[in-house]
Image (cartoon, helix red, strand yellow):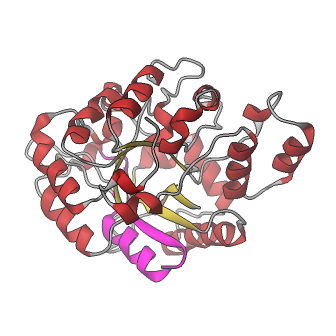
Amino acid sequence: MIDCHVHLAALRTEGNGCYISPAMLRSPLFRFLAWKHDLKTEDAPRSNQKYVDDLLAELRKAKYVEKAVLLGMDGVYDATGVLDEARTEFLVGNDYVLNLAKSYPNKFLPGVSINPQRRDAIEELERCTEAGATLVKVLPNSQGFDPGNRCFIPFYRKLAQRKIPLLSHVGYEIVLTGQDQTAGDPDKLRVPLEEGVTVIAAHGCSFGLIAYEPYYPTLLDLVRRYANFFADVSALTLPNRFGMLWRLQRHPEVHARLLFGTDYPLGVFHWPCWGRIGWRDLRTIIRTRNRFDRKYLILKSLGIVCRSVDQLISVGTDFKSVPLPP
C-alpha cells in the first residue's frame, strides 16, 4: 500500500519555504505534536529533521504500507493572486516537498500544494509536474478559494492534461482557520470532474462534525456519475469522522473508489471497531502501535477494501484498466 495522505510540517528556516504562524504554534494540536515528536521551536533545523526521521522510522517498520505521499500546504492568496501572509497560518513549500521525496525515493512521493487562485498557478503546476509531483493537494476552506469557481477551469484542464490527480479536503476544517467552510462541500468538485481531472475527495467525503453526514448522498452520486472520482479514507477513525466509516462499511459497491490514507501525524483510533469485529481481531488492532498498520488492519477487519494511489497514477485518466463499480 501507498498512503496518499501524509502531512509534512516544518518550521521556517532560510530558504525552505515553510511557515507556521505564532497563533498556530500556540494551538493545542501543535503543542501536542511538539511534545510527541520532541520538537523545539527554537531549533528549527533539528525539529524539521526530527519530524521527517520519526515519519521514516514508523513507515519503515510498517508491514502493510510501503510508501507515503508527502503533502505540502499552499497559502492564502488575495484577489490579485499574491500570497497573503497575514491570512496564511501554515505553509509547506513545494520545493521542500519535492526535495524530501527526492532524498528518500524509496519511501516518499511528492504531493505538492497549489492554490489555483495564485497568479502563477498553471506555471507552478508545470514546474512541479516536471519535477515529479504525484498529485496536487488543496484545502479550500483554509486557502480561501471556491473549488467550484469556473474561473479555475484553465488550471483544472492543465491538471487533466498532465494526468495529475487533485486531492481536495472535504468537510469542516478544524485544525486551521476556515476562511469559508462551505468550500469543503464535495458538490463543488463537479467542476474539475467535468474537466476530466482525477479528483480524490479527502476523508471519505465526511462532514467532520460527529455523526452528521450530509455529504454521503453526494458521495454516492459522484461515484455513480464520474469514473474519475475517488475518495481517500484518511482521518476516518477520528471521533468526529468515524460515522462515515460505518456508512462505507455498509456500501461495498463504493469500495473500488476508496484510496488508502491515514492523515498522519494524526492518530488512528480503534474505537470504530468496538462491537463490529471479533475480540481477537480487536485485540490485535489495539496492540498494533504502528499507525499505518493499525489503519490497514481496521479497514480489513471492517471489510472495507481500499486501493493504493499508485494504481491511479500508473493509468492516468485511462480508467478502463481500473475495475470500478457501476
Magenta span of residues: 88-112
Q: Is residue 93 magenta?
A: yes
Task: Classify residue 235 as left or right of residue 138.
Answer: right
Q: Quadrant of residue 112?
A: bottom left
Q: Quadrant of the C terminus?
A: top left
- Towards the viewer: 297 or 147: 297
- Towards the viewer: 281 or 99: 281
Residue at image position (20%, 70%) is 127
Q: Position of residue 229 (x, y in %)?
A: 36, 41
Residue at image position (42%, 43%) is 230
Q: Which residue is farthest right?
A: 280
Task: Classify residue 154 as left or right of residue 267.
Answer: left
Residue at image position (65%, 28%) is 246
Q: Position of residue 46 (x, y in %)?
A: 55, 74
Q: Quadrant of the N terminus?
A: bottom right
Task: Classify residue 243 as left or right of residue 168.
Answer: right
Q: Quadrant of residue 3?
A: bottom right
Q: Against 62, is 195 above or below?
A: above
Q: Position of residue 313 (x, y in %)?
A: 38, 62
Residue at image position (13%, 63%) is 123
Q: Is residue 174 visible?
A: no
Q: Position of residue 40 (x, y in %)?
A: 58, 64
